[in-house]
Structure formats: C-alpha cells, structure tokens
Image (cartoon, helix red, strand yellow):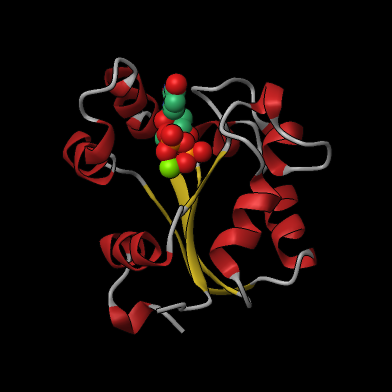
Amino acid sequence: MATNRTFTMLKPDSVEKGYIGAILEKINATGFRIVAMKMTQMTVADAKEFYAIHSERPFFGELVEYMTRGPIIAAVLEKENAVEDFRALIGATNPAEAAEGTIRKMYAASMGENAVHGSDSDENAAIESAFHFSGREMF
Ligand code: UDP
Ligand code: MG
C-alpha cells in the first residue's frame, strides 16, 4: 500500500559539515512536509539492526562506524509518491554518479559518506520510521 511517506536521515557527515539547514531547505522546497524530526545518535547495535540487510557486504563495518560516529537528523517526510520522489531528490548512492542538483551531488563526499538516507520502498519507509519514532512523535 502506498503511504505517501518516506524516512530520511541526514547522516553524521551532513551534521558535522553544517549542511542540515541547506538540506532541509531543499527538502521543503521540493514539496515534502516534515511529519517527524529529531537529532539522535545511533548505537552500534542500532546501526547493525537498521542496516541488517547489508550485514554480509564488505563495507558493513565501515558503514556502522560512519553511521554511529556522531548525531544524525532522523525525519519522516510526506508527499505524494514520497519514496520515489525522495530517491530522485537525493540522487545515486555514489555521488560521482548522482544527477546535477541532487542532494548527494551537492553535499556528499563519497559512496561511503553520502550525506543522506532515503527509504527504498513504502514497506521499508514504514519499518524505518517505526525504528526511530513512536506513533505519538509522527504528525
Ligand atoms: N555503501 C557503501 N559502499 C557501497 C554501497 C553502500 O559504503 O558500495 C553505504 C552508503 O552509505 C549507502 C549505504 O551503505 O548509502 C546503504 O547502501 P544502499 O545500497 O542501500 O544505498 P542507498 O539506498 O543509501 O542509496
Ligand atoms: Mg538503501
């Protein structure tokens, strides 16, 4: 079922470099409504669970280290066709391959440190939102 909601994280590199405001501005300007948002820091156990699908990949250790090294901004976003439109807004996983004007093209340093997360399906958007937020924190 399409939910018209997606889940995002502005990753530790975005927070460290002071890009939060610029990225949120771009998200707003693209028509997404913020329905939940907080600054939080994932524990190693959190990151291993969140990225469990990648646990056998060679980059898993680095990914967990990166995602836990500092605070993130977690948010739930609402818009018609949210999952697909947000993936288009953030661009390819590797910023070198991301389209001009996308968030990763503008703010990501590398494939590993790529500034922002976006859910890849409605099902995962719901799972990932519930991982970070209770029902009373989503508006
Ligand atoms: N990642 C990495 N190396 C890779 C692929 C992915 O370091 O070769 C990291 C990167 O931070 C990416 C995350 O793992 O955002 C999750 O990978 P996925 O394939 O789900 O990419 P995404 O959905 O974030 O575009
Ligand atoms: Mg993914």
Q: Position of residue 117 (x, y in %)?
A: 50, 45
Residue drawn at 66 percent across, 27 percent down: 95
Q: Nearer the viewer, residue 46 or 119?
A: 119
Judge whether 32 appears above or below 19 on screen: below
Q: Nearer the viewer, residue 40 or 10?
A: 10
Q: Is residue 27 visible?
A: yes
Judge whether 122 appears above or below 40 on screen: below
Displayed quadrant of residue 101: top right
Displayed quadrant of residue 127: bottom left
Residue drawn at 80 percent across, 65 percent down: 29
Q: Position of residue 96 (x, y in %)?
A: 70, 21
Quick check: 109 left or right of 38?
Answer: right
Residue drawn at 68 percent across, 57 percent down: 24
Residue drawn at 36 percent across, 26 percent down: 63
Residue ranking furthest to the top: 58
Q: Position of residue 135 (x, y in %)?
A: 30, 81
Quick check: 76 left or right of 123?
Answer: right
Judge whether 37 appears above or below 64 on screen: below
Q: Position of residue 131 (x, y in %)?
A: 27, 60
